[in-house]
Amino acid sequence: MRDPAHVGTGIPSLAVFRDPASVAVVGASANPAKWGYWLARGALAGRGRRSVHLVTRGADEILGTATAPSLKDLPEVPELVAVCVPAAQVGPVVDEALRLGVRGLLGITAGVPDAGALAARITAGGARLIGPGSLGLFDARTSLHIAWGDFPAGGLAVISQSGQVGSEIALLARRAGVGISRFVSVGSQLDVTTADLLEDLADHPSTRAVALYAEGFEDGRRIFEAVRLLKRAGKPVLVLAAGASEAGARAARSHTSALTSSMELVDAACRAAGALRVPTAAALVDVAACLMARVPVRGRRVAVLSDSGGQGALAADTAHGRGLTVPRLSPRLAAEVAGLLPATAATDNPVDLAGAGELDLMSYRDVTHALLQSAEVDSVLLSGYFGRYGLDSAPLAGPEQQAAAELAELPHRHGRALVVHSMGPDSDTAAVLRDAGVPVFPTVETALDALSGAAELRARPGRRIPRAAGNGVLPGGYWETRATLVRAGIAFPEARQIRDHRDLAAALAELRGPYVLKASWLEHKTDVGGVRIGLFGAEAVTTAFTAMHRRLGEGTYIIEEQDVRPHVVELILGGRTDAGLGPMVMIGAGGTEAELHRDTVTECAPVSPRQARAMIRRLRCAPLLTGWRGAPPADLKALVRAVVTVSQLIAGCQDGAAELEINPLRVGPEGALAVDALLLSTPGPSGHRAQEAP
């Protein structure tokens, strides 16, 4: 039976890829080594729900089903057509499908000639296209299977910009006992995009979590809006992304760009949307296993239960390293646990069974029960030998599996998660646990990575990114940038513009030393000798100006009062607009060694004061701001205001393409003072940008 929502109402734009009434595979094959065979095999598995047609000139019958030589020879117009023919034949097949009124096309073939024009014809014809170059799609709920490979049904949706990576995720998920609700390989995205497919999952009934693999975020803002939609629908998103290279930093014209890698921007977008980026396909599946558990992880407090003191200690250390807490058990709970174990057992957390498992396998159940029913932990990590008893001693297989079945009931009874690291991860006992919704891992590191990731994902509510009003900020030299920031509320030292010795004399009469001399039009003044600091008295300033003017030539120079306040911390504060992901704000350890320290935090802009404070706290250098080694604390309120201001400025840039940097921002007990700044436009196709001419 088809989805009632699709009957009699006209199929919505992407519903044809969910539950079509009829499917045709063009390029079907009887050869199991060919794509056309797998597409036909999968499509035919859904004949109980829809009509399936196979189109080929190579065989009269495939898998017991009669074929037709072309789409026009079919007894009906199929709603969805999978195209798996040589690249040169794709165009004619698609044109025939459009003439017949086909509503959905799945393009498997890659390297299609003039694919852009083909996609335009499809759109103009009122149809939709996934691909070309797609590995296929699968929907467990509607028995739609037009893809290479097998997908056991479950709750994880996979949307992948690489068919092979998506297939790997699905394969790893199967081994971990995690089933697939929907699988789509997006291919070239000439029509249907990653964002479209994510949005389409928001009301997908069987999807509980989403795995996204992306190789680029040109449409990043819309992708992460879709991720927010999924988060609100109770479907957390795990992101696997490619492109964590430093290539973009090589050509960076500001420290802000050089210090914010592509993955840091993706991480910021994930945090803002309530998603989590993971480093590998295996890590994604591990976290997904915790999300798919019968009772998912809900917090960071972990009780470690092991049958080895060494393994328990290692697990506790690993947990701390993953940002989890292993709290000491209360005297009452420790005494309860002690009553279940030998006198030599450790009961503070981690808990060591001290051989009790060998005496009675149900001791695993009893201690886990005591820990899970308490309100002192959010989850229990069972680490060690459990799962291997039956492998090493056949008489223990049955009792161990019974203990596993009873263990698996405890999370549901108490509403807290159980995660297992087993030395027998492929045993029948482990299968009992997985089948009952308890994730099992082969190493304690993977178990705790997964537990930590699931807890982090739950703790990320996401946030709405407000659209800032255009502020008219335009690129310019230091003086123009400084004026823009002063108007926005960022404080600078007193300064004057000068072009000659007469201007210099007038400026010295109004300013207090020591002084700083700058060539205002240069982007990185220190690198080319365009700045001199620590100039005391008129003679020193005049000598420095004469030498700098002779070397750098005509232009507007700046004479500025030098900030000599004690107990000052130098930071870098900047923002940039990423073409795909939008405006970002960054704060970090600053000064001329900013790129050496690489101590930065980046978030989507604009940020609120609360979010700015959280950014500051995450810096490794944050203790310097709160009174390090007896120094007075810095004015954090002033710093927070500066972060918020810069985030609003970069978010409101009218052309949507700019980089803004204050380096250093000197923060001390008396406030925050910017002593150099840079505002750039992102180069257009010609590489042109506005700046003050020397």
Image (tube, rainbow, N blue to C red):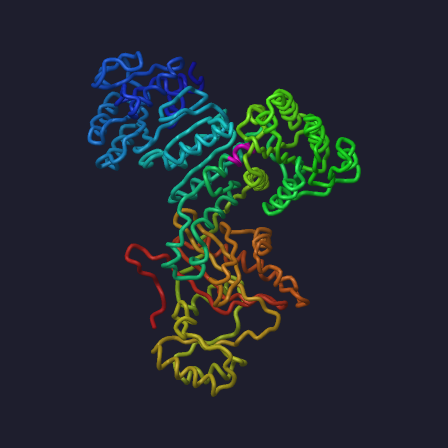
Is most of the magenta stretch helix, strand or loop? helix
| Range shown magenta | 286-291
Q: Is residue 599 above or below residue 406?
A: below
Q: Residue furthest bottom?
A: 539
Taking the magenta stretch, the answer to whether it contains residue 288 is yes
- Toward the viewer: 515 or 641? 515
Which residue is painted at 34% across and 70% down in the image? 693
Quadrant assignment for the N terminus: top left
The quarter holding residue 308 reads top right
Which residue is painted at 34% across and 19% down in the image? 41
Q: Relative to residue 609, is residue 468 drawn left or right?
A: left
Taking the magenta stretch, the answer to whether it contains residue 287 is yes
The quarter holding residue 380 reads top right
Quadrant assignment for the C terminus: bottom left
Q: Picture coordinates of residue 233 (x, y %)?
A: 53, 32
Q: Is residue 485 above or below residue 220?
A: below
Q: Picture coordinates of residue 25 (x, y %)?
A: 29, 21
